[in-house]
Amino acid sequence: MSPWTWTAAARSHVGHVRAQNEDDYLSVPEQGLFVVADGMGGHAAGEVASRIAVDTLEERLTLRGNETGGESQDSDDGDVLAAAIREANRRIHGESRDDPERSGMGTTVTALRLRGGGDWTVGHVGDSRCYLSRQGELERVSRDHTWVQQQVEAGRLTPEQARGHPASSMLTRALGTGSEVNVDRYRGELREGDLFVLASDGLTDMLSDEALGSLLASGRGPDELADRLVEAALDAGGRDNVTVVLVLARREA
Ligand code: CA
């Protein structure tokens, strides 16, 4: 029935510097749903924000929540992802407004949905990233919502200057900071061997796209790659929480 299948691996590490891990992730291969969220805010509120994002997506997008999960194709995946992300935003913003300890909390979210028919869809807010490694070529799928990214697009910073820039964590868009949020969407069709990487900035600040691309092109499976990526970020300093979700898509024989 389903010509496409996938295997996934997920890791999250607190890193060498931070006391807490404010990243969170979701990996539900049987329903083709994968999420990374990177929270921010004092008094452990960042952990709360990223957890609300992940929980809301799980509730809204998997069979554990309701029937819009699974293989139902009645609605557009981009619409459904965006609606779930906007719902997460409302919940985080509501808690942040009502609880002084959680005032100002927020999170990024990058969510990938794969379908057995061969379509992929990404919903994205913030500076966690979705990459696609296809036939050894690494492509950034999502565009960072950061001040630094705006400078790169305006030609005022090079991509190399952007990575690890002192202002690199300054977000221009996040969940929880306003009552509404715009969700970016990306979509495409799967090809044999497509390898998706969702990652928090604790990976991508530590590792250039070139370094990431060559690790991914090694032909290793998602499990071993996930270990290698976290290891590489830690070896490079591990200044932030590191979270990766890898998803390898194969066409069934
Ligand atoms: Ca981070």
Image: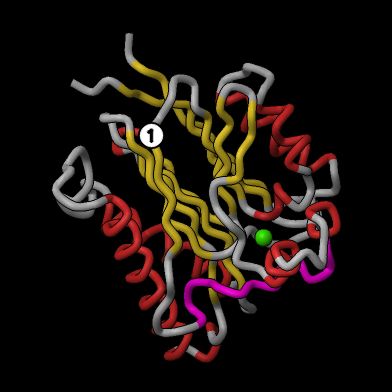
- Quadrant observed for ligand 1 in the rendered image: bottom right
State left or right for residue 121 relative to residue 221: left
Q: Nearer the viewer, residue 105 or 196?
A: 196
Q: Quadrant of the C terminus?
A: top left
- Magenta-drawn stretch contains 154: no
Badge 1: residue crowd in 10 Å (few <14, some 14–19, many ≥20): few
Indicate whether 48 appears above or below 80: below
Whole-percent x and y of residue 178?
Answer: 47, 84
Q: Is residue 166 magenta?
A: yes
Q: Is mark 1 within 8 Å of ligand 1?
A: no
Please give the name of the residue rendered at 28% of the width and 59% of the height, measured from the top-left corner: 79
Please indicate whether residue 96 sits to the left or right of residue 43 in the image.
left
Residue at the spot x=58%, y=61% of the render?
Answer: 38
Q: Position of residue 34 (x, y in %)?
A: 43, 44
Image quadrant in which you'd find residue 101: bottom right
* Residue closest to the eye, 251 or 137: 137
- Residue beneath disc 1: 189
Magenta region: which residues?
165-177
Q: Is residue 111 left or right of residue 65?
A: right
